[in-house]
Amino acid sequence: MKPYERLLHYVSIDTTSNPTSGDHPSTPNQKLLASQLVIEMRDLGLFDVYMDEASYVYGTIPATCPHAITVGFIAHLDTSCDVSGKDIHPQCHPNYQGEDIILNHQENIILKQSMFPALKNEFGRTLITTDGTTLLGADDKAGIAEIMSMAEYFMNNPSIPHGTIKIAFTPDEEIGEGADLFDIKSFDCDFAFTVDGGDEGEISYENFNAASADVKFYGSNIHPGSAKGKMVNSIHLAMAFHQGLPHDETPEMTEGYEGFQHLNTTTGTVEETHLHYIIRNHNRIKFESQKNRFIELQDAMNQQYGYRVCEVTLKDTYYNMFEKMKGHLNIIDIAIRANKKVGITPKIIPIRGGTDGARLTYEGLLCPNIATGGYNFHGKYECISIEAMDHCTDVLIQMVHEIYKEKM
């Protein structure tokens, strides 16, 4: 089965994760996809295939040569809750010529090449898009599809020499919980790669340090007709707090190694308002400074009013894997060679986000990231080409060859 065929099946299952669920997995359909992947892996003949209670899926392609390096490949089951992942209707556009694509005539939703200039790389290919009403789910079901297609290749070619290949699919990566219950000990790899997002050839061993900030504001409501000197409007408090943050440190104003704080949800009344931020920076010192700014704003606001009107709760999510990877860049060399041998120019790109691999690296399993070939993740303009998925699958296969030779 071709990688894109797998993708088109996987995206039919809504696996949007839910950050407020408290369950593992956070949504039931992640378990449904996990169960189907267990069946598919067993049908391909993989060994030791199972799904645990939290819907982590594991499987093994046995070594054809003893004493070779054991490598793992990891992708995640869930999709972002930023945009709906329900009732996804993928569309295929053969022989893309760089034109704007009308995703949805009724809603006049258009994928514009001028807005997304990287689409020029897909000239002549078959582009898979959404219908403009949902995300596509290639993040990270393209990664799952490419890993499964790589697994099918090796299971169908048992004469090819390689070490043990471990496969894992995780729930709830998009809400920062994908590594929470990952069984590193049983996975038992020398190192691994997440296969999660990015243009063809992208290889990443740097990512943001990440934290969340939940900020609550407490007001005092009273009839507006008699409110003078008495009402404290928590919505106004929240607006003042937000204005105290640097205006040029937001996602839409930053790129590369520049950090940001991103206000991504708000709820509020006069009596109580909640703001939720994510905080990101590649530099650990700047990251700590960003978090401290939230505390300083909280303290200044509480001092101004003389009692608690603002409460900040900070939670670190993951850290920059570079601190652990920088002494093991021979692993990155493997990925570079593999890309070159299948005709793709490798690009070392810092992730403006994170993966399960960031946390797994800090927990003892070195785990940089390999691209899946897609664009515009977490939104209705998400897309990927059939050819890019084929190429990224070829890279995974070639990486296994390179890893085997590394041991020889």
Image (cartoon, helix red, strand yellow):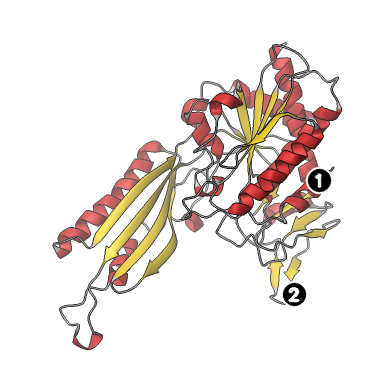
Do we see residue 260 in this rendering? Answer: yes
Which disc is residue 105 wearing?
A: 2
The amino acid beneath tag 1 is Glu
The amino acid beneath tag 2 is His
Q: CA distance from mark 2 to mark 1?
A: 26 Å
Crowd tier of the residue under label 2, counting other residues whose Cα lies within 10 Å: few below 14, some 14–19, many 20 or above:
few
Q: Secondary structure at mark 2?
A: loop
Q: Residue placed at 74% from the left, 63% from the top?
A: 89
Do we see residue 139 in this rendering? Answer: no
* Percent of width and height locating residue 301: 21, 60
Give the mark, 2 or 1, whose residue is nearer the N terminus: 2
- Residue identifier under label 1: 387
Q: Residue placed at 22% from the left, 73% from the top?
A: 220
Left or right relative to 94: residue 382 = left
Where's the C terminus, which quadrant?
top right
Which image quarter: residue 230?
bottom left
Give the number of callouts.
2
